[in-house]
Amino acid sequence: MKEIMRIIIITTAAVLSLSVYACGSSNAENGKEKRTEKESEVFVKVEPVQLKDFAETIQLTGSVESRNDIVIPAEEGGRVVSWKIDKGGYVQKGQTLAKIDDAMLKAAYDAALANYNMAEVNYQKQKAAFEEQAISALQLKNLEYQRDAAKAQADMAKLRLDKTVITSPIGGIFNDRLADEGELIGPGMPIAQVIDMNQMKVMVGVPERHSKELRLGLPVEFTVDAYPGEIFAGTISFIAAAVNPDNRSIPVEINFTNAQGKLKPQMIASIKLRLVSSAKAILISQDYIQQVDMGRLVVYVVNNGVAEERLVTLGGSDGSSVRVIKGLKEGDQIITVGFQNLIDKQKIRIQE
């Protein structure tokens, strides 16, 4: 039994010795490989880091709206007699949409018109009498006032009668009937909705920290999910004077022409807004940046004939380049070609 235990102990010790030797050999070879990699030259291309004009591009989400979305009220009360157009149809400015029963207002107008005609006849008759000095100037003036008052009443009655015809104040799509035929409505009640689908806008809130970088007329690009890959363009037409206290953003409107009628109100717009800025910054292509362990972002620069790994901190983007806040300085030679397989301190040869 003792002999068996002795054999087991000797065998275990031998295995451990071989394992230690193998690990040592492996580490040595890995170190040798890394030294070999660093010592072998890699051909690269570089470009100098420069300060450039920087205007940050920010991504925002907004809502498409019509610039003219009109809910039309009835200015006179009565029963809706008829509709003259179906929902979804195009209407021109001034086109008739609906008719309200006008029987009572027509009678009132006829009476007022008759009173005016009578007052006019009486005035003309008494005017002739005045010229023959049969009445005084004061009497004639009183008749003139009566005639004018009767005319004003007739005009008012005609105006009210005309308002029983509901017309569209704008050209656009007749989007909704808000009262049915036969329904009794009162003055001021909404009766129809017309939307101008040509002149549109995008409503968006811009973070208040960017307030000084906004300008009227600033060009804006945006997309919508309904037309993937298609870019729509507009310009900033309105910047609110006050910050929205609910989300600390500045309400902004972006006008655009919906010439083909593709976009609809309440669509969600993904906006790319290029801000105004006179600042200088270090800008590099996003392609030159690598993400390594623990999410670190690095680039490679030339330092005494070797590639030096630099940890960088990024800021905003202008759409084509990204701003480097920390890690690079003006005049650094950043490696732009051949950096993908580099390691820190590796020898390099610069190609022209």
Image: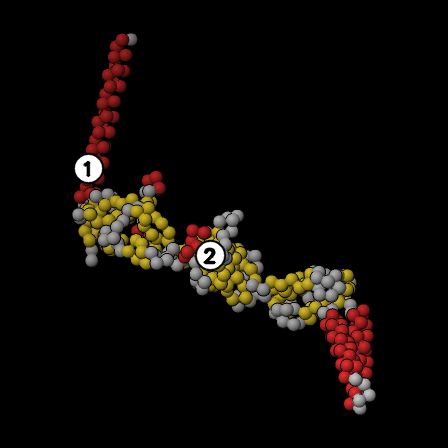
Q: Which residue is mark 1?
A: 32
Q: Mark 1 and 2 residues: CB-CB less than 8 Å, in contact?
A: no
Task: Give the residue type that dot 1 points to.
Answer: Lys
Residue 108 position in % (x across, y down): 80, 72
Please give the label number shown on residue 300.
none
At mark 2, the secondary structure is strand
Residue 117 appears anywhere in the view: no
Q: Which residue is mark 2?
A: 271
At mark 1, the secondary structure is helix
Relative depth, front residue between 108 and 8? 108
Quarter where residue 311 is shown: top left
Q: Residues within 10 Å of mark 2 (few under 14, many from 20)?
A: many
- In the picture as drawn, the residue positioned furthest to the bottom comes out as 132
Residue 327 position in % (x across, y down): 28, 46
Answer above or below: position of 254 versus 141: above
For residue 67, side relative to residue 319 (left or right): right
Relative depth, front residue between 70 and 293? 70
Q: Residue at x 20, y 47 (%)?
A: 303
Q: Residues within 10 Å of mark 1 (few under 14, many from 20)?
A: few
